[in-house]
């Protein structure tokens, strides 16, 4: 169980750091014309590919949740970018970083709750098994 929790945390951290790194690359290419477009396109392809792999391992309810969160995020980002069209690129980066941080925090909270639920279920099953073993011996 501890290995699973460590793996989930490692994965979540890796995804967050990957996102930050890619955001930095994108912002460094900002204003670079074709280079910027290629950087953004490559980043999108990578993220979509990773998402597709993960989505393929989810049950229907989780896929529906992902679709719902994706739609909400797209709507929020589109509204935010509409407002920020004339904004300073540094402010756009800050807002993007803030959004990434909030997403990371939400994911981390979800992972913690899930890990806690799994741990409780595992502990409960182990206690039940121990109690059953004690009755038979």
Image: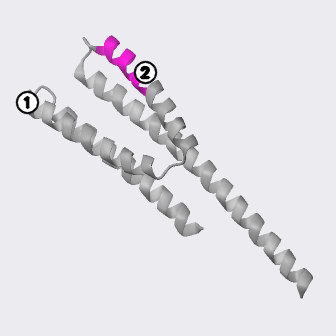
For this rendering, which residue is in front, 132 or 63? 63
Residue 76 among magenta residues: yes
Residue 32 among magenta residues: no
Q: How is the image coloured?
A: one colour
- Residue at left 37%, top 46%? 52
Label 2 Cα neighbours within 10 Å, binned few <14 / some 14-19 / many ≥20: few
- Residue at left 45%, top 41%? 104
| Residue identified by numbered label 2 | 76
For this rendering, which residue is in front, 18 or 60? 60
Q: Quadrant of the N terminus?
A: bottom right
For this rendering, which residue is in front, 74 or 67? 67
Magenta stretch, residue numbers: 73-84
Q: Name the main secondary structure of what is drawn in magenta.
A: helix
Quote the CA–CA distance across marks 1 and 2. Answer: 27 Å
Label 1 Cα neighbours within 10 Å, binned few <14 / some 14-19 / many ≥20: few
Q: Extreme front residue here?
A: 60
Q: Is residue 42 left or right of residue 15?
A: left
Q: Position of residue 68 (x, y in %)?
A: 51, 30
Q: Which mark is residue 137?
A: none
Q: Is residue 74 left or right of residue 66?
A: left
Q: Is residue 104 above or below residue 118?
A: above
Q: Quadrant of the C terminus?
A: bottom right
- Residue at left 31%, top 43%? 47
| Quarter holding residue 21 | top left
Q: Is residue 12 left or right of residue 5?
A: left
Q: Position of residue 29 (x, y in %)?
A: 14, 34
Q: Is residue 129 above or below residue 25?
A: below
Q: Position of residue 26 (x, y in %)?
A: 21, 35
User: Tag 1, which secondary structure?
Assistant: helix
Q: Position of residue 22 (x, y in %)?
A: 26, 42
| Residue identified by numbered label 1 | 34
């Amino acid at each position: 169980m501890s290995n699973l929790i460590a793996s989930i945390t490692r994965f979540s951290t890796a995804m967050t750091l990957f996102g930050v790194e890619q955001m930095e690359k994108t912002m460094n290419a900002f204003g670079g014309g074709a280079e910027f477009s290629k950087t953004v396109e490559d980043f999108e392809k990578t993220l979509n590919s990773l998402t597709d792999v993960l989505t393929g391992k989810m049950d229907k309810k989780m896929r529906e949740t992902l679709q719902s969160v994706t739609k909400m995020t797209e709507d929020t980002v589109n509204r935010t970018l509409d407002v920020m069209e004339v904004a300073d690129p540094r402010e756009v980066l800050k807002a993007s970083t803030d959004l990434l941080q909030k997403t990371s925090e939400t994911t981390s909270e979800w992972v913690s709750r899930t890990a806690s639920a799994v741990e409780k279920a595992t502990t409960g099953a182990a206690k039940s098994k121990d109690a059953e073993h004690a009755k038979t011996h």
